[in-house]
Amino acid sequence: MPDLEAFRTETRAWLEANCPDEMRQPVRDEDDVYWGGRRAEFKSDAQKAWFEACLEKGYTVPAWPKEYGGAGLNPAEAKILRQEMSRIGARPPLSSFGIWMLGPALLHFGTDEQKEYFLNQIARGEIRWCQGYSEPGSGSDLVSLQTYGEDKGDHWVVNGQKIWTSYADKCDWIFCLVRTDKENKYQGITFMLFDMASEGASTKPIKLISGASPFCETFIDNVKVPKSYGEGIPAYVGEINRGWDVAKYLLGHEREMISGMGGGERTAAIGAAMSRRAGELDPVLRADLAMFDVDALAFTALGEKFLDEIKVGKAHPAQPNMMKYVGTELNKRRHELMMAAGGSTALEWDSEETRGGKHSRDWLRTKGNSIEGGTSEVMLNVISKRILDLPGA
Ligand SMILES: Cc1cc2nc3c(=O)[nH]c(=O)nc-3n(C[C@H](O)[C@H](O)[C@H](O)COP(=O)(O)OP(=O)(O)OC[C@H]3O[C@@H](n4cnc5c(N)ncnc54)[C@H](O)[C@@H]3O)c2cc1C
């Protein structure tokens, strides 16, 4: 395909000219990731330059249409850009729940005005979004959620509590599932968008086993949510009381995004680097590392196959559940192996040498991978029912 080859050459040259060396290094700390938002600060000039270059080119959201801040790349071009970025180890210029989750839902269900209004802000990294799905009594059984929006004509008054809301304390807006009809379980939920600075919205960080506090309890006390933010810009996505359809669609994208962690660094290299006796790794551990690498390669190939199936409209709608299950279990295994390879040093928690126990904290953080975005058990239920068509599932 001569056009695609020309695109690859052009892309490679553009990346060479615009991606600073510092942005080609692996992400080491949380502030190496640029999340955008009202309170965003760039860690370095290189991070800023890389973000701005990508923004101008439409590469913060390369596959979105140009009118919404993207570059309008087709799937084949987007794949080439991903490959070329991965070849030089380029970091994503902007990470955001707006890009990974809300954006695809808006592209599918939003009005034209709503898309223009919100998607451009997401592409420019102006608003940082969080996801208000889970509640203290509703996780896997999400449809039982109780947060309630009372209809007051031109607005709702919303009351309830969300939990495990990632980065809620750092976010500007929330996409939030709110019950708007108590009589109708599935068709009584509205997918609302509102500002976290609204009166009555507050957050309280929850500490994780790793010592970090990446998520929060979110309290919604008499928050007034207008039904519209302007002509053609409803404060909800899809239809009132039909938010469950939007929620499920978004979950597919969330699961795809989370599954990406399965395709991380090759473990043999990491294991060797971590071990102080690299040449003398235990043969059983060495075999486990090799087996992991084979499985990680198979996972990457499976991901490529799925993307190709999506391109030709042949993807099974439950595939993201499969990718989520395999990707997160793989990432947990990767970190178990890194700890095993690192020996007692890897368990260290505080020293400068381990950059404040980075390896052990990262390892503990992976324990949540098979919970966030739907647990492994729930993924297996979906796979058995919708892909394998098992009896009784
Ligand atoms: C790191 C992290 C970040 C998160 N970020 C967000 C966020 O930003 N926004 C948000 O809304 N939520 C977020 N969550 C919450 C997450 O979506 C829920 O934790 C998850 O859906 C599970 O719900 P639960 O915690 O209520 O567990 P439960 O649903 O109570 O499950 C408890 C256990 O029972 C098992 N189980 C439940 N039902 C079944 C079944 N039918 N069959 C077999 N086993 C079952 C589960 O697998 C699990 O082991 C996050 C969670 C984590 C860990």
Image (cartoon, rainbow, N blue to C red):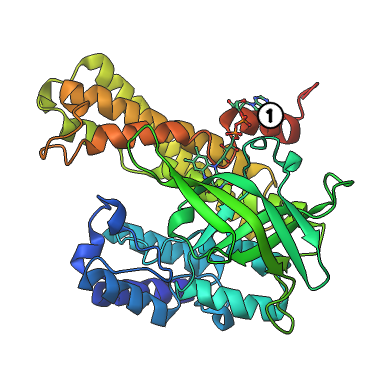
Residue 314 in view here? no
Q: Nearer the viewer, residue 359 or 1?
A: 359
Q: Residue at x 53, y 34 (%)?
A: 371
Q: Is residue 18 above or below residue 385?
A: below
Q: Is residue 27 above or below residue 110?
A: above
- x and y percent of residue 133 in the render? 63, 48
**Amino acid type of the residue tagged 1 in the rendering:** Asn
Q: Is residue 230 above or below residue 362?
A: below
- x and y percent of residue 191 in the render? 71, 59
Q: Residue at x 22, y 71 (%)?
A: 46
Q: Horizontally, is 216 left or right of 240 in the view?
A: left
Q: Quadrant of ligand 1?
A: top right
- x and y percent of residue 329 in the render? 47, 31
Q: Nearer the viewer, residue 216 or 300?
A: 216
Q: Horizontally, is 16 left or right of 225 in the view?
A: left
Q: Residue at x 37, y 75 (%)?
A: 54
Q: Which residue is mark 1?
A: 381
Is the C-beta of the residue carrying label 1 under 8 Å from the nearest atom of ligand 1?
yes
